[in-house]
């Protein structure tokens, strides 16, 4: 799948992925693609679309809420663009 990342980072985090390890800085970027796009998993890395209105297993409990807020923000921007800037 080919997708261009949006220019502005979606999130910056400082997290520890294990209780005995140091925190790591991370920057997350967004790419908008059609949900019907075929995902191609990598070896040992399953790929799947996750619904934002349903819980899933993850390391950080707040991630789903952040993603949902970001999707709503993106949707608002796309609706505004579709209506035109004269609104």
Image (tube, rainbow, N blue to C red):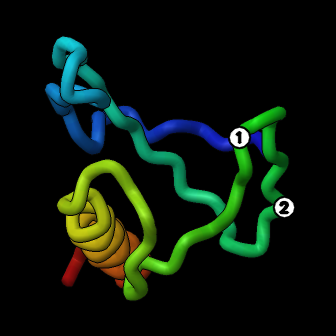
Residue 32 sits above or below residue 42 on the image: below
Residue 49 sits above or below residue 6 on the image: below
Q: Nearer the viewer, mark 1 or mark 2?
A: 1
Residue drawn 21% across the image and 19% down it: 20
Kindly indicate the quadrant of the structure image that contains residue 18: top left
Residue closest to the eye, 53 or 60: 60
Residue drawn 43% across the image and 40% down it: 6
Return the x and y of residue 10 as percentages of the image width and height: 28, 43
Q: Which mark is residue 20?
A: none
Side (left or right) of 6 relative to 49: left
> Which residue in the protein does label 2 denote?
38
Return the x and y of residue 58 as percentages of the image width and height: 39, 57
Is any atom of residue 77 visible in this view?
no
| Helix, strand or loop at mark 2 | loop
Q: How many marks?
A: 2
> Which residue in the protein does label 1 denote?
45
Return the x and y of residue 87 as percentages of the image width and height: 20, 83
Label 1, residues with CA under 10 Å away: few <14, some 14-19, many ≥20: few
Side (left or right) of 79 relative to 70: right
């Amino acid at each position: 799948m080919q997708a261009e990342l949006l220019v502005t980072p979606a999130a910056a985090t400082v997290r520890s992925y294990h209780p005995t390890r140091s925190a790591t800085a991370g920057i997350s970027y967004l790419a908008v693609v059609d949900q019907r796009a075929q995902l191609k998993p990598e070896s040992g890395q399953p790929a799947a679309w996750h619904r934002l209105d349903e819980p899933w297993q993850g390391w950080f409990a707040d991630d789903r809420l952040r993603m949902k807020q970001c999707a709503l923000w993106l949707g608002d921007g796309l609706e505004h663009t579709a209506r035109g800037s004269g609104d």
